[in-house]
Amino acid sequence: MSDNEFLLAISEMMDKKLTPVNERLKRIELTQENDILPRLQNIESCYTSTYRRYASGIEEMEALKADMEIVKKVVAEHSEKLKKPA
């Protein structure tokens, strides 16, 4: 057997051995592309929109707290004024 024949035989043997690995790798890549990535994008989109809602909700909550502090102060002042005889 010549060196070229030997190398050709090894090459064919490696191709046979690697064929199942390559097929599996292609299936994995297709699964990632068609199943996993769209799901991750959906999760990301849901997370992002939820984050935006909560971020604006926190700002509104802080404004409401500030308004309530003012209301409490005004009510306390009015209560004091109403306690005094006219």
Image (cartoon, rainbow, N blue to C red):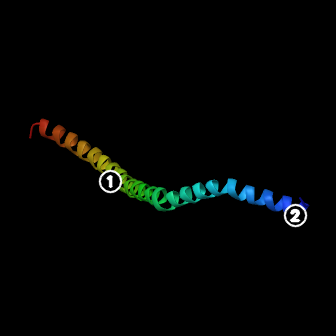
Mark 2 and 1 residues: CB-CB less than 8 Å, in contact?
no
Q: To which residue does mark 2 refer?
A: 4
Query: Where does residue 30 sit, x and y in percent of width and height?
Result: 52, 61
Q: Quadrant of residue 5?
A: bottom right
Amino acid beneath label 2: Asn
Q: Which mark is residue 60?
A: 1
* Badge 2: residue crowd in 10 Å (few <14, some 14–19, many ≥20): few
Q: Which residue does the image show at 63% across and 54% down from the upper left?
A: 21
User: Distance from label 2 to label 1 (Cα)?
Assistant: 77 Å
Query: Where does residue 15 sit, x and y in percent of width and height?
Result: 71, 59
For residue 17, side relative to residue 66 (left or right): right
Seen from this angle, which residue lies furthest right? 2
Viewer-closest of 15 and 74: 15
Query: Where does residue 23 sit, x and y in percent of width and height?
Result: 59, 58
Can the viewer see residue 4 in this picture? yes
Viewer-closest of 82 and 86: 82
Amino acid beneath label 1: Glu
**Mark closer to the observer (2, 1):** 2
Can the viewer see residue 84 in this picture? no
For residue 14, side relative to residue 1 (left or right): left
